[in-house]
Amino acid sequence: MKIVVGLSGGVDSSVAAYLLQQQGHDVVALFMRNWNDASVTLEDECPWIEDSNDALLVAQKLKIPFQVIDMSELYKERIVDYMFAEYEKGRTPNPDILCNREVKFDIFLKTALSLGAEKVATGHYARIISTFNEDKKEIFHLLAGKDRNKDQSYFLCQLNQYQLSKSIFPIGELTKSEVREIAKKAGLATAEKRDSQGLCFIGKVSLPDFLKQQLKPKEGEIVEIFRDFPEYSKEKPKFSTKLEELKFLSSKINYKKEDGKVIGKHQGAQYYTIGQGKGLGIGGHKESCFVISRDMEHHILFVGEGHSFPGLFRKALKINNSEVHWIREDLKLKNGESMEVLARIRYRQPLEKAVIYQFEEGFFMEFEHPQSAVAEGQFAAWYIGEECLGSGVIS
């Protein structure tokens, strides 16, 4: 089978290419150049040049064709511009999930197929299996990677059945240490290379510096809210319907300046995310302060002291119906239906018990235990067992 591997210059995709070659496939390597501006990265060198060189060394070692494709314009348009727009609105986007949906498994996939490939492969720690339903239709299942510490199914939670049908994750059954051992034995140049950090394909960046490229600083006040804020101790009302209760539990508190005390200044509310504790420049507290809300209109950051501060937690979240994505379309909820699931709202977060509900007014997720730092713009993904069923953007 002809398979195009997205060779990123890291050990994971290198081993993916090696394993496919060992299995007898006709392997072609493509390196995606998605960023040209090294001025915002924290490394001295330009990361994409180093990565493309490493990818080339691996391709030469394996004696497979290698090509660099420039997707920087598309990446800027679909990922970076979207990120800027979301942060400006006071939301917290996930560029890695978007990169998979919009770039790797869309444009890159189409490019690979145009080269005569039957499938694309990447170095993701996830698995795909397929089964047939009663109508003999093939259903593709996205499963967590065997290495639970590296599982990347969350980053793939926006893929659809077609994209899964054309994809292979060769290292999904392996642990990171096994991948490194294979790379070492095969003599691959990336065997000891450290994992990349930061934005998908850009490298490690200072997010405020990156955002300042487009979003101008707007000085504002930092207002501390205290634990005796009346809203926190307010008795929960009685609800006549489950929908009413979910709307209440998922709604965020709209704080005002007079609800707390001004304790500092910031250079732009758009540079901070819900739950952020670093970079606030606040002293004089026993515990760290965390961002609990942002008023983008009046440029106010609201903070609360301590990891257990009540304003950090919410029991439920809402996803607009237009933002609900089912990988398993055959399991999609109808209006009025609900389903017990496991869910997470960020990468590496342990899966939490939750119930999802579908209504005409929107899709709701209610957790067994309140969740910290639920941020608009993040993706909530839901699972049954090891299988990711779908995801959506928190509204």
Image: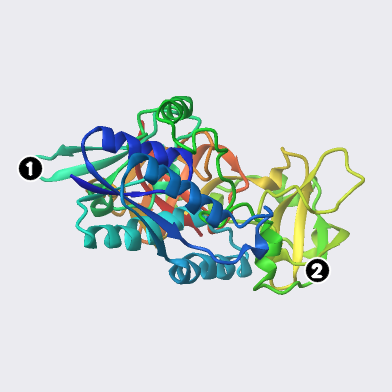
The residue beneath circle 2 is: 220
Residue drawn at (77%, 40%) of the image: 306
Left or right position of 203 against 103? right
Q: Position of residue 64 (x, y in %)?
A: 31, 46
Residue 373 position within the rendered picture, expressed as x and y whole percent measured from the top left: 63, 47
Kind of residue at disc 2:
Gly
Residue 183 location, x and y as percent? 43, 31
Q: Residue at x 43, y 69 (%)?
A: 74
Point out which mark residue 136 bears.
1
The answer to whether mark 2 and mark 1 are in CB contact below 8 A is no
Residue closest to the eye, 357 or 352: 352
Visible in this render: residue 341?
Answer: no
Model colouring: rainbow
Q: Residue at x 81, y 70 (%)?
A: 219
Q: Is residue 330 left or right of residue 187?
A: left
Q: Earlier in the sequence, mark 2 or mark 1?
A: 1
Q: Is residue 387 above or below residue 316?
A: above
Q: Quadrant of residue 169?
A: top left
Where residue 381 appears, x then y in whole percent?
43, 46
Spatial CA span between label 2 and label 1? 60 Å
As shown in the figure, which amino acid type bears the numbered disc 1? Lys
